[in-house]
Amino acid sequence: MAGEDDVNLQEFVDFFPEVQLPFMYADSSLYAKTDDSLLISPEIFNEFTPDSILKTSFNNEIPKLYAIGKFKEKDGATYLLSKAASAKHKIMFITAYNDKTEFLAGFPAMKSKKDKGTTTSITIDKLYNINKKTVKKLSNDIEISGDDVYVLNNAVKKFMLIMTDSLGDDAELINPIDTLSKEYRYAGDYGSGNRNIISIRDNVKSGRISFFIHLEEKNSQCSGELRGEANIVSDNIVEYRQPGDPCVLQFKFDKSGVTLNEVEGCGSRMGALDCTFNGRYPKRKVTKKYL
């Protein structure tokens, strides 16, 4: 699978070893040496996976790619687990294919971190829930942890975040799209405080932007995240609208900030139906570096 021989999609899927659920993969495995017999050439990987999957995370870097494993839903999708490693980044990807072996969705499930006090692991249970657990050791030897749970939504062909339990106020918020380019006029970070961010970045598709929102209200049950792509609908307005998702969110930019307006209710993403993303958020004068 490391050469340039012709390979069909079924052969590509068959190359991945079977794994049994529940399955756990720790971030230490991202740094460990992987057997070269599991090596996949970038050309073959990109033949069966949109090249945007790698390009979004690695830009112009060409990582080494390895098969971790695969599992299959009963009468449903097949999941492939891959490791991509370059000098700067090491990432575990999960991609999914339907029963006709057609690509459905993919996302970077876990990334290497520079913070030695933080560890991350992925656990996939027998119900195909993908749980990313992050544990951080504080200076007083107290450990705090947080969980993000993802599932495959076949209808919209996307992995969706269905639950998030953040590390807490003392933990560093990780912006998963921080390293993406910022050529779009209103690209940047918005929001106040270290636990609230609306991050806007470029997208590989013309006429779209990538965004990541994390908002928390103290002393309130309103807390949540939303990440995705939004269409540029005018000079200063972009809109998140996806088939199968009831949430429709509008971003209106000006020189000093962004106003979020829920065109259709997104409250369930914020922990309760009476919670909302609505509000005005100032643009950050100095961008904080998230690791």
Image (tube, rainbow, N blue to C red):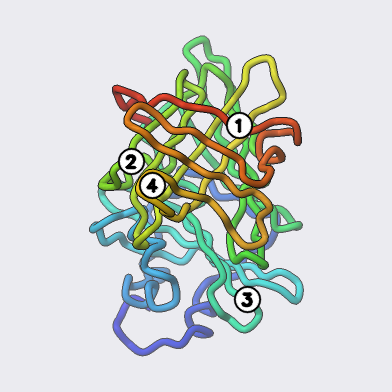
* Nearest the eye: 239 or 217: 239
The mark nearer the N terminus, 2 or 3, is: 3
Q: Which of marks 2 and 3 is in front?
A: 2
Q: Distance between the residues labelled 3 and 1?
A: 31 Å
Residue 260 visible in the snapshot = yes
Q: Is residue 47 above or below residue 92?
A: below
Q: Which residue is drawn at 62% across and 47% down?
A: 161
Marking on residue 187: 2
- Expressed as whole percent of the image width and height from the top left, the position of residue 231 reads 45, 55
Query: Is the C-beta separation of discs 2 and 3 under 8 Å?
Result: no
**Of pointers 3 and 1, the one earlier in the residue sequence:** 3
Q: Is the residue marked by circle 2 packed among few (<14), some (14-19), or many (20+) residues within 10 Å?
A: some
Residue furthest out toward the front: 234
Is 239 situated left or right of 42 in this image?
A: right
Q: What residue type is labelled 1?
A: Gly
Query: Which percent across, then down, holds residue 119?
Result: 50, 34
- Circles 3 and 4, Cβ within 8 Å, touching? The answer is no
Residue drawn at 66 percent across, 72 percent down: 77
- Quadrant, the C terminus: top left
The kind of residue tagged 3 is Asn
Name the disc covering residue 31, or none: 4
Q: Which of marks 3 and 1 is in front?
A: 3
In the rendered view, tell whether residue 73 sits above or below residue 13: above
* Residue drawn at the location 42% of the way across and 69% of the way down: 38
Say which quarter of the image contains residue 2: bottom left
Which labelled disc corresponds to residue 98? 3
What residue is rendered at 70% in x and 19% in y? 220
Q: Horizontally, is 116 left or right of 220 in the view?
A: left
User: How far apart are the two marked residues, 2 and 3, measured between alpha carbons?
Assistant: 35 Å
Q: Which of marks 1 and 2 is in front?
A: 2
